[in-house]
């Protein structure tokens, strides 16, 4: 663990998920009954958010990413966490206005 920087205004430094926002414990089932739209779900923060919402018990996840292979990979990871979550995968480039329009028509 790296030494903390001095001076520091932060008393506690967390290097992992801290308990008050942990979707596996404190937030378990807090997303029950919810439909969650996650853009950029193919990697990074978007993929992590999809997995966290699966842990938190979301009923339905709408995942968007630019590539189908990334969507498939994220969906497989989500299904490994929860077989109960319904997953809708929509390949979308959020910088393309017509694709965004198509996305919102599909989820209405």
Image: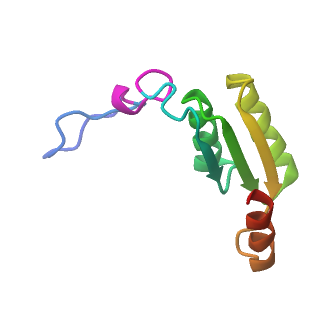
Q: Viewer-proximal residue, 35 or 54?
A: 35
**Residue 103 on image: x %, y %:** 77, 64
Name of the residue lying farthest toward the bottom = 97
Assess whether residue 62 is covered by the magenta stretch: no
| Residue at screen point 53% across, 35% down | 31
Q: Is residue 85 left or right of residue 3?
A: right
Q: Is residue 3 left or right of residue 106?
A: left
Q: Which residues are magenta?
A: 18-26
- In this picture, is 71 found above or below 107? above
Name of the residue lying farthest toward the right = 68
What number of labels is visible?
0
Quarter assignment of residue 87: top right
Q: Is residue 6 left or right of residue 90?
A: left
Q: Viewer-proximal residue, 73 or 59?
A: 59
Predominant SS along the magenta part: loop
**Residue 54 on image: x %, y %:** 62, 32
Quarter assignment of residue 78: top right
Q: Quadrant of the N terminus?
A: top left
Q: Is residue 102 left or right of residue 36?
A: right
- In this picture, is 49 found above or below 65? above
| Residue at screen point 58% across, 29% down | 57
């Amino acid at each position: 663990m790296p030494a903390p920087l001095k001076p520091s205004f932060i008393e506690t430094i967390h290097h992992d998920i801290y308990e008050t926002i942990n979707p596996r414990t404190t937030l378990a089932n807090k997303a029950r009954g919810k439909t969650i739209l996650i853009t950029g779900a193919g990697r990074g923060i978007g993929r992590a958010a999809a997995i966290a919402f699966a842990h938190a018990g979301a009923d339905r996840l709408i995942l968007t990413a630019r590539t189908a292979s990334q969507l498939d990979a994220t969906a497989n990871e989500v299904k490994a966490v929860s077989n109960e979550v319904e997953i809708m995968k929509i390949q979308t480039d959020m910088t393309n206005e017509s694709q965004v329009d198509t996305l919102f028509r599909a989820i209405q």
